[in-house]
Image (cartoon, coloured by chain):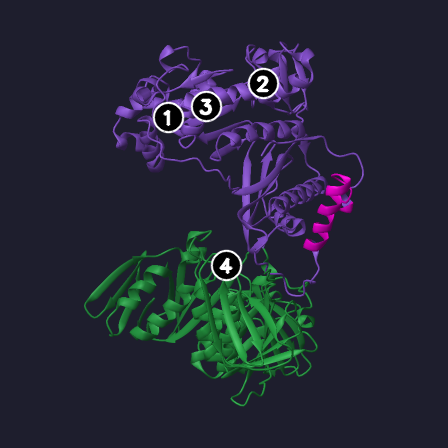
Amino acid sequence: MKFRVERDALADAVAWTAKSLPSRPSVPVLAGVMLRVTDGVLQVSGFDYEVSSQVSVEVQGDSDGAALVSGRLLAEITKALPAKPVDIAAVGPHLELVCGSARFTLPTMPVEDYPSLPDMPASAGTVDASVFAAAVSQVAIAAGRDETLPMMTGVRLELNGSSLAMLATDRYRLAMREIEWSPEDPDISINALVPAKTLNDTAKTLGPLGGQVTLALAHGGAGEGMIGFAGGTRRTTSRLLDGANYPPVRSLFPATHNAQARVSVSALQEVTRRVALVAERTTPILLSFSEDGLVVEAGGTEEARASEAMDATFTGEALTIGFNPQYLLDGLNGLGAPTAVLSFVDAFKPAVLSPANDDGEIITGYRYLIMPIRVTR
Amino acid sequence: MGRSQAVGRGGDPRFGADADDTGCPMLHVDMDAFYPSVEIRRRPALRGQPVIVGGLGNRGVVSSASYEARAFGVRSAMPMTRARALCPHAVYLSPDFEAYTAASRAVMQILRDTTPLVEPLSLDEAFLDVSGARRLLGRPAEIAAQIRARVAGELGLTCTVGVAPTKFLAKLGSTRGKPDGLMVIPAAQVLDFLHPLPVAALWGVGERSAESLQRIGLRTVGDLAQAPISLLRTAVGEAAAAHLHELSWGRDPRGVQPEHVDKSIGAEVTFDTDLGDPGEIRKTILALSGKVAARLRAAGHAGRTISIKIRRADFQTLNRSRTLGSPTDVAREIFDTAWALYAAMPHTGPLRLVGVRVEGLVDGATAARQPELGAPQHGWREAETVIDAVAARFGGAVIRPASLLGGGDQARTENPT
């Protein structure tokens, strides 16, 4: 194997693939990235049995072949290289890398020990890359991080015709985003539970590339339990989580509301961040809504206290409700709109955050549900 | 109790009741063979006989033994089977915690009559700081004598009191003065007293540390005091080295903490025969969760971290814990978490012991609770509060989870926690 490649293209490709490598691999070869050159195309791949990632880079190939080297080391080296063409060649058990006056010799691992990457499942349809990336970032934030509750660590994709819904919850808040996509089969109806971290990393990579993202999802048969994403020259596959018993979370959204408030997203973010400084990790911030506006408070009788009043338009009976400040901030950050509409049933039932335009008109497609903290005072 | 072997009985007149107690404001009051003494008090026929209190099942351990039984080598925490081999003719009794708690309350009341600065360590021992009681009640040794007289006269029980400049030394004094004794460790003679003792007499030196210290040639507290700290560090680690060095020079800055603050509340059981049936293990965890939750609510606490402990038949012990989003005192939530933690443990064979514990305690009344989405406004917590009220009125097990109803319960011993 011998080829010449642009420094930036190589560094990007290696950095992305190496990011998903396991930090403590079960077998040493999984700490490697595979470099394979065929007909002037370099494929850089990484795999940890859960997630595979692969990126193609055009190169000047002198001879085809493959080599497996430590992903982390190669990522660090390529990041530090000068902006000059990089010459890479497999020489016996080593990889020679020359860039300008810098020369590296890296040990390689046996290519034949490396597991073969799973095939991409068949394409189920395509979605605009930037829309997809924005939607994922709005939803993945609500997924759980507790590995002992695996179902909560996933984002549920519901593909129904041309509607693509994403849902995630950690049992305390729930985010839901509905976007349009172009399915191969207009009558498609599939659900899939994708690990939130993988989905988020993937969306962050594919979004800026623009164009379309292909969603590849096996519908029975080969590749079942697997999802693939492809955009530009990059593709990722991930094992799906078992979502067969995913709770019917859509029904948690209250059908009606008794009170509604409209506030500026940036103002509420700012006030919440400031007031929450005195809230301990498990103590709530209190939002008191009335015709006069909104007062945000935190702290106890014996600890530090903070309060701040701000503008809000409110309809309904005056109400004080407590939230985990981080959950509220996550929801506000996800709105992506100038105004937040908060809809309440009462102080004990889940509240809904919806984005709205400057005139306070709700923008449909995204909702964030948050369970209040019960406050004793 | 456990230190008596390391410290031994002293008869040295330098440390008697008449020794100079100037600068000795700390008292350690330790009841003598408390559980057996309470039993003997209500059954005087037992006086003079070896009496052993503890779990009587075949996996029980000795909680406490009378001095007559100790003469046969019976010690607390010893397996009951061994006690029976050493002292077959002793009177064996199951613990009656209600009686001990009542007796303990009476003892603590006498101590609080002396000074509000009382720090109970357990049912049968407490520290007192009498530096403020001097004018009212006399010198520390006189106060100690008054306490001993009142406990004997009003309660028919004996205790031993250590009087010393620091808590640690007061405790050593009471250990050394046992039983029915009074020992003063004068400020001027602290090092004379301390340095000949074996290292195991120091607080924080267990069997393991004692071994590591002896391996580097440190047998007595005096050896340890003279040793460079760097040497101690290699044997017992950084934190313990500094702590032991201070103690070895009689320095112990801790004051008496009148409010005993719980750090965690837990319950565990040892099975009389190893338990393999997952259904039974589940029931046990359910029962323990209920017990812990009731104790939390009774004490007005709630905690965020749920931990579970199992001990396998081969004595391998595993602990797992998970921290919740907000504190709980609800049996249902404790159980759900404890069961999930248990289910995620590697399973190999039957269990000898199971324990459930809640840590990171906060005030239960003001604790903010983050319920799950869709949780009803009146949920398990409200139901369990009602159960508490019913139990308070009609006794312990009137309302229980359905799976805990009925007889045929596994024989088990609840461990003291």
Q: Position of residue B323 (x, y in %)?
A: 54, 52
Q: CA distance from mark 4 to mark 3?
A: 40 Å
Q: Amino acid at mark 3?
A: Ile
Q: CA distance from mark 1 to mark 3?
A: 12 Å
Q: Chain of mark 1?
A: B
Mark 2–mark 1 CB contact (< 8 Å): no
Q: Which colour is chain B painted?
A: purple
Please tell me how crowded label 1 is: few (under 14), some (14-19), or many (20+) other residues with Cα within 10 Å: many
Instruction: Report which residue position mark 4 lands on.
Output: A301
Q: Chain of mark 2?
A: B
Mark 1–mark 4 CB contact (< 8 Å): no
Instruction: Report which residue position mark 3 lands on.
Output: B143
Q: Position of residue B356 (x, y in %)?
A: 60, 42
Q: Amino acid at mark 1?
A: Cys
Residue A65 is left or right of residue B44, and the answer is left
Q: Is residue B272 above or below residue B177?
A: below
Magenta-span inclusion, residue B399: yes
Instruction: Report which residue position mark 2 lands on.
Output: B153
Determine the residue positioned at 50% across, 40% down.
Answer: B259
Instruction: Report which residue position mark 1 lands on.
Output: B24
Identify the secondary structure beneath mark 1: loop
Determine if marks 1 and 3 fall on one subunit.
Answer: yes
